[in-house]
Amino acid sequence: MKYRDYLHNTPIDGSELFRYARKIRKELHNDQNIPVKIAILGGSTTSTIKILLELFLLDRGITPTFYESGYNRIYEEACFSTKELVDFKPDIIYIHSCMENLCSLPEISDSESEVESKLKKEEKHLAEIWSGLQKTLKTVIIQSNFFVMDYADYGQQDRICTTGIRRYIQQVNQIVDRHAIEKSWLYLFDLEALTAKIGIRQCFSRRDWYQYRQLIALPWQGEIAQALASSIAQLYGKTTKCIILDLDNTLWGGIIGDDGLSGITIGPDTPAGEAYFQFQKYLQRLKERGLLLAICSKNDKKNAIEGLNHPNNCLHEEDFAIIKADWTPKNIAVKEIATALNLSMDSMIFIDDNPAERALIRESYPDIRVPEIGDDPTRYIEILEQSHLFEYQIATAEDLQRTGFYQQESARQELQKQSMNYEEYLTSLQMQAFIHPFQELEIDRITQLSQRTNQFNLTTRCYQKEEISYITKSVQYLTLSGRLTDRFGDNGLVSAMIGKIDSKQLYIELWIMSCRVFGRQFEYLMFEELLNLCRKAGITAITGKYIPSAKNNPVKDLYQTLGFHSEDGHMIYDMSKPLEKKCTIIERITHENN
Amino acid sequence: MKTIKKLEEIFQDILDDEAIRLTPQMWQEDIEDWDSLSNIQIVIASEKEFGIKFTLAELAQMHSIGELIEKIESKHESRS
């Protein structure tokens, strides 16, 4: 794991970031980043959030330098142009204020008109801060809005009572909104919504407030800093422009290649189907807002299209700018998508339920965003929302020019060099295989695998439990089941072979492998193990047959690849020929403890 | 692992200095980078590492490694 990965967890753990901040910073150092000068004016402590903000900006290709105002001296520094601040010449000013920094809060005894005049005073005060800064520094200002720290005097009625604190803060926030709409150089940082999302009880701590004057409890400053970094990155054109999506178990439940059109889960008719449907709808709204959608799926193209044309989908074939569905490793496919759409890696995000694919992409292209989306469709939206990747770009070139703000050309190559090739990646998976003849306890799983595997299935023969049970015990058969683990965990029993012995010949009746582990060399290891068994059993030749079906196209050349030769419509492997070892990466474990 | 060893790793991570060795006798002044900002980081990282939360009173008396260890260990005991 790289230290920078702490920046991409959901939820973000600020405690970890504070611990590894220096190490992350070192790892992210890059001379080609855009330098940005940020002045933070704080009504509370800002030194900690600054540390985290720096990390998230570095991660987005921006190297910040900071100016911090004196503690709670926002108004003074804004209106009386502090020399240090003027000399610093900030590109961006961030005002981190809170309700304690307001001129006054309503008292219980206040009349309606007294509250009104307090609000007027508040608006005047804020407007003076903004125009004071704008006048001398002529640059973009990001203003955080306000949230109620914890209690309110009037319980559920606080929002409608004259002197209710919630009513007051709500009205102050409306003032901020109004000015942000009017002033092209004033941007909103919606701390109220962010803290509400996280939950005030978690992200406001009276201990951290009294002890350190921290507006946000320290462990939650990570997510706030991440959102702020996204707001700033957006000003430099660093936004997400394209979402690359997997299909199976990402846009719908199940595997189209194995389960077929009627077997996949999609559509509002079932709870699980609705989860996928609503995720598609979420993506569709992003698409309408201007993002591109792309597919990157290990599937036969015709299966992918068939799935996308399922009538219960919210998204359809035409919603995607590009549909890449084949069996090339995803790191290559993603690069092809980037090239085709002419997008840089840092403007794309990659969504896939398979952790190994996510790691491959993350390790191949450090700049592409790969949220830890998991494999639970009910959490996809939540996790994406938490990663703050879809910041809306409201700045126009004209706005930026007017405020003396300019976009620097990134010196980076359009496409990042791959840091790892596929073989190195496979090695990094630290795969371990457990291969042995069928065991009693595996019969159910093998039966199920034989019934459900349609793609890596040479004979597409279905077995019942009783047959597998019989074969397991019979001396007429050689069997092998394979389990594969990698550094992401145990993939479980993912492959099985059945061969029938007939006078020193072995006929492969079944060879299946779950599509989860395609492209990992596991099939080669299974075959080498079969050769070992055959040698011990005195077998002289192996016969295999590929029986084409609608879905097993991916394995049509497997026997040729393994060195079988064709003879009377069968594929024959001559046991006397020397073994060509094709699997070099998976470690085979012979003694299992569990 | 002993508390002091875990704490040593926290200091090493936060100050990015693998050479740091802690003894209970060390005071804040003895470690060059242990300023008020890194102190906040040390507190938060320790709370995470040991699964505890310091009170205001405890935070007020944490100026040496010995004091820090004592607070951490008494919290651990009272929990178990």
Image: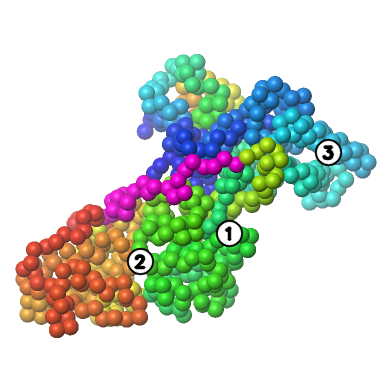
Please identify the quadrant where the N terminus of chain B is shown: top left
Report the Cα–Cα distance between label 2 and label 1.
26 Å
Res. B24 image quadrant = top left
Q: Is residue A395 left or right of residue A342?
A: right
Is-magenta flag for residue B49?
no
Crowding at dot 2, Cα within 10 Å, few <14 / some 14-19 / many 20+, comes out as some
Q: Is residue A156 visible in this depiction of the protein?
A: yes
User: Residue under circle 3?
Assistant: A123
* Amino acid type at mark 3: Glu
Q: Residue at x 35, y 80 (%)?
A: A550
Q: Which residues are magenta?
A: A407-432
**How was the colour assigned to the protein in this rendering?**
rainbow
Q: Quadrant of residue A126?
A: top right
Q: Chain of mark 1?
A: A
Q: Which mark is residue A141?
A: none
Q: Which residue is mark 1?
A: A291
| Label 2 or label 3, whichever comes before in sequence order | 3
User: Mark 2 vs mark 1: which is more N-terminal?
Assistant: 1
Residue displayed at 59% across by 65% down: A284
Residue linked to disc 2? A327
The mark nearer the N terminus, 3 or 1, is 3
Q: Main secondary structure of the magenta part?
A: loop
Nearer the observer, A356 or A86:
A86
